Amino acid sequence: MENTSVASAPRLKRSLKLSDLILYGIIVIQPVAPMSVFGVLSDRGRGHVVTTLLIAMVAMLFTAFSYGRMARAYPSAGSAFTYVGQEINPAVGYVTGWSMVMDYMLNPMICIIWCSQQAHVFAPGVPYAVWAIFFGAVFTGLNIQGIKTSARVNTVLAAGMGAVVAIFFVAAARYIFGNPHDGAAFFTRPFYDPQMWDMKSVLGATSIAVLSYIGFDGISTLSEEAENPRRNILLATVLTCLVIGILSAFEVYAAQLIWPATQPFPNSDTAFTYVAGRAWAPLFAIVGFTLLVANFGSGMGAQIGAARLLYGMGRSKALPQSFFGVVDAKRHVPRNNVIFVGLIALGGAFIISYGLGAEMLNFGALIAFMGVNLAAFVRYHVREGGHSAVPPLVITALVIGLVLLPIQNVALLVAAGLGLVILAVWTPPLAGFAICFFLWKNLSWKAWIVGGIWMIVGIAFGAIKTRGFRGNLINFDLPEES
């Protein structure tokens, strides 16, 4: 009787096909992902936005492949912290987890900044500071109430964003072909403009472009509901990055043709709305409102995600349990943490710019991506592959050594590129690690200083809490929603 009852217990239905998983990934990342960061990428990359997004896509494809493979080994956990801690070392897993905390704390902050900037464009009579306080209070207030957006609403929002993107493409085509231009060079400049090209600037912008892809790892959380998860989770993760990368490249390519890099934007943070308005005047408000809604949803989701992560740390006594480890009895949300994250996000919105916030977020994300690539290498190419790890590790060290040298040296870049090709064929996870390291290295010095301080504080905190990483490891996995 006992066995019969266990067998008949309700289980998650494996009903999600490959196409469903890809659609979910696109919804999570959002079809308008590159629009919010377009102006920042254009300024930093000297106009080569489409090039930066395509380079970043290559890095994310390798990393997505590693995430997909690790999801096979850990189908019930989609955390870089778990992958690295289990496959490499608990202490290295802790460092990866601490970098994730940085991401979770920064995401609502940059959403407040963007929403406030866009609202200020719509209503310039209201100061940015007032809008920042407004959005910070709304994010916090709604999350305390326990309001949760359903998957159906997310799907409707994504469909609406897709419609806006389609309208933009039509308007962009009419504008581009309805106005004079200077021949074939006009269409190639977004990829390479010899007068604007600067390798260091392009690579620095590529490090920020990673932001357009963040969220693809969420597909791994659907392992128990997917048909043939060992195959489809991997394919969906990689294909989602590919679809988003190609769609993003088309969006910014059209935008660069409409608004050449030689013309400054009235506001870099909200640059795409001005581009859309030039293509067709009504799109200024339509695209602006669409991006405002997108960032509003992302900001709310990011805040509750950060609050839940802090709750998990408080529950495991990594943080003071009396404050971080409690749940509001009425709303069933970690209210203290929601308020704490809201205050941090609001304070940051007055201190940093959207561009710097994006770079700081990517500082942590790229550490996590490097960790997952290494974890995949250890599991599938060292433990299960039965091959020597020395040759690929030597090649990786040489590639990293080359990219640490002056960037303008073309011969060194060619040598590094050949090394990456060899790694991609031999051990794809190490190629992903090397590219992510390259992008991480090219973040701005401000992001390095702030990110470095965050990591030093976190490592010291972890060492104290775990007696030199010999005690129980701090848990950075998100707890289950109640």
Image (cartoon, rainbow, N blue to C red):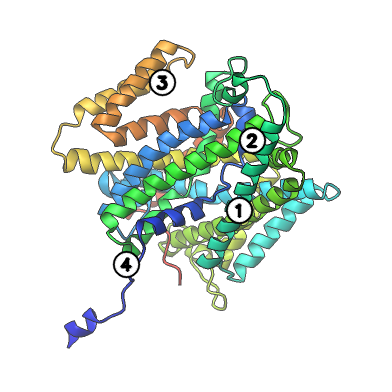
Instruction: Return the disc, 3 or 2, that comes first in the chain's sequence.
Output: 2
Pointer 4 or 3: first along the chain: 4
Kind of residue indicated by mark 3: Val
Q: Which residue is mark 4?
A: 14
Q: Nearer the viewer, residue 81 or 372?
A: 372
**Amino acid type of disc 1?**
Ala
Residue at 58 percent across and 55 percent down: it is: 298
Which amino acid is tagged 4? Arg
Residue 463 in the image: above or below residue 17: above
Frontmost of labels 4 and 1 is 1
Q: Determine the secondary structure under disc 3.
A: helix
Ranked by sequence position, the earlier of labels 4 and 1 is 4
Per the image, the residue denoted by label 2 is 255
The residue carrying mark 3 is 403
Q: Residues within 10 Å of mark 3 (few under 14, many from 20)?
A: many
x, y (%) of residue 428? 29, 35
Direction from residue 372 to residue 142 in the image, left or right: right
The one nearer the camera, 124 or 404, is 124
